[in-house]
Image: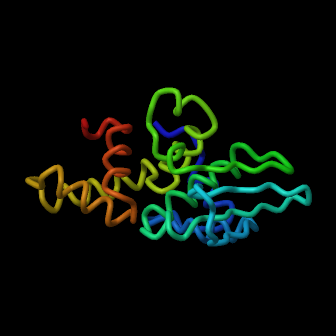
Amino acid sequence: MDHYPISSLLNEKAIPFDAPINVDAIASRYGIKVISTPLQGKVGEITFNSDGSSVIKMDPFENSYEPRRRFTLAHELGHFFLHRVPNYAYEDTKETMLDRKNTYWDGKEGEANSFAAQLLMPEKLIERYGTQIISADNNISLDDFVNRMSTIFNVSKQSMRFRLSGLGIIKI
């Protein structure tokens, strides 16, 4: 079950609730500036300024794969909605964003990753599109199902597998 009110967050700024979720529109509508710039050893970061503005910086090399870029942006949006502190920056290295060790999932980085997964792959949309795919082909293989779902949601296959597993739809 999802913990974050994603549909209300999108409704608040009239962002369509359909796959793929437009994370760039979310950043824009909440006044968050998104910059692509080299970041030494970091995938992305968000800075909260004292004037209330926020800036997300994303390394173009680390985020050259569009599903990776979308996840990084959604992750930084997670920090924006969950952990906003004036004059503070969350810096995410490749290791902290991709590591799934238990110690990693205990904290703000884990919360931002969970938020990102729920934002990019909302449970209601997973159910809607999953049902459509199964209805069209009830003999579809698990790999083909994951591939089609990841394409619809513009996320990596790994992210989709992890999300479907987290929702109890598949076992990995």
Q: As drawn, which residue projects farthest toward the right?
A: 51
Q: Is residue 74 above or below residue 161?
A: below
Please give the name of the residue rendered at 17% of the width and 49% of the height, measured from the top-left corner. 142
Please give the name of the residue rendered at 25% of the width and 40% of the height, measured from the top-left corner. 170
Check the picture and name the quadrant holding the C terminus.
top left
**Residue 156 horizontal side relative to residue 25, left or right:** left
Nearer the observer, 59 or 122: 59
Nearer the observer, 77 or 149: 77
Q: Using the rendered view, name the quadrant where residue 4 is placed.
A: top right
- How far across and down, in percent of the image, does residue 171 sit? 24, 36
Please give the name of the residue rendered at 19% of the width and 55% of the height, measured from the top-left corner. 134
Please give the name of the residue rendered at 38% of the width and 51% of the height, measured from the top-left corner. 159
Q: Is residue 27 above or below residue 107?
A: below
Q: Is residue 112 above or below residue 62?
A: above
- How far across and down, in percent of the image, does residue 169 sit? 29, 40
**Residue 153 horizontal side relative to residue 30, left or right:** left
**Residue 88 horizontal side relative to residue 71, left or right:** right
Q: As drawn, which residue projects farthest toward the left?
A: 139
- How far across and down, in percent of the image, does residue 97 sit? 52, 47
